[in-house]
Image: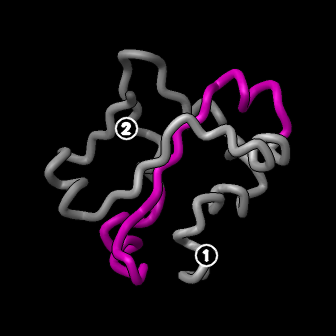
Amino acid sequence: MPDDHFHDTTYFCHYAGMSENEAINKVLPGQTNDQSLKNRDCLEDVIDNYQEKTIMVYVFDADSIETLSWSDICHRYLVLKRYELNLNQLNSMNWEINYP
């Protein structure tokens, strides 16, 4: 993924949409999800490759994801929360992101 696009707040629109297994990305209120990023590259290495040394995590409303097109979500920027986190922040949070 090109570094020059990373800090664009609409970066999530570069994806075609949610993964084939959308359920793996869902987190219900009061629940945790430790599976979403489990089978992906080592995040420490991914973060280290970016100039800004941060990753972005986006939170969307499940109803929006399930009922609207990805194009509509992007165009209307239907992001509930965007986190921009570096390794120090993630480590201090014990790699746990709480919303809200």
Residue 68: quadrant of the picture: top right
State how many labels appear: 2
SS type, badge 2? loop
Give the residue drawn at x 84%, y 41%: 72
Give the residue drawn at x 80%, y 48%: 75
Q: Residue furthest front?
A: 76
Of callouts 1 and 2, which one flags the residue occurring earlier in the amino acid sequence?
A: 1
Chain part drawn in magenta: 40-69
In the displayed structure, would residue 43 be above or below residue 18? below
- Residue 16 picture location, percent across and down: 78, 55
Which kind of residue does numbered mark 1 sit on?
A: His
Quarter the N terminus occupies: bottom right
Q: Residue furthest top?
A: 30
In the displayed structure, would residue 75 be above or below residue 22? below
SS type, badge 1? helix
Left or right: 20 in relation to 91 = right
Q: Does residue 55 belong to the magenta stretch?
A: yes
Q: Which mark is residue 5?
A: 1
- Residue 7 picture location, percent across and down: 52, 69
Left or right: 22 in relation to 81 = right
Q: Does residue 15 belong to the magenta stretch?
A: no
Residue 26: quadrant of the picture: top right
Q: Residues within 10 Å of mark 1 (few under 14, many from 20)?
A: few
Q: Which mark is residue 17?
A: none
Give the residue drawn at x 38%, y 77%: 52
Left or right: 7 in relation to 87 = right
Left or right: 70 in relation to 45 = right
The residue pinned by badge 2 equals: 34
Q: Residue furthest left?
A: 92
Which kind of residue does numbered mark 2 sit on?
A: Asp
Quarter the C terminus occupies: top left
- Select label 1 or label 2 by which is in front: 1
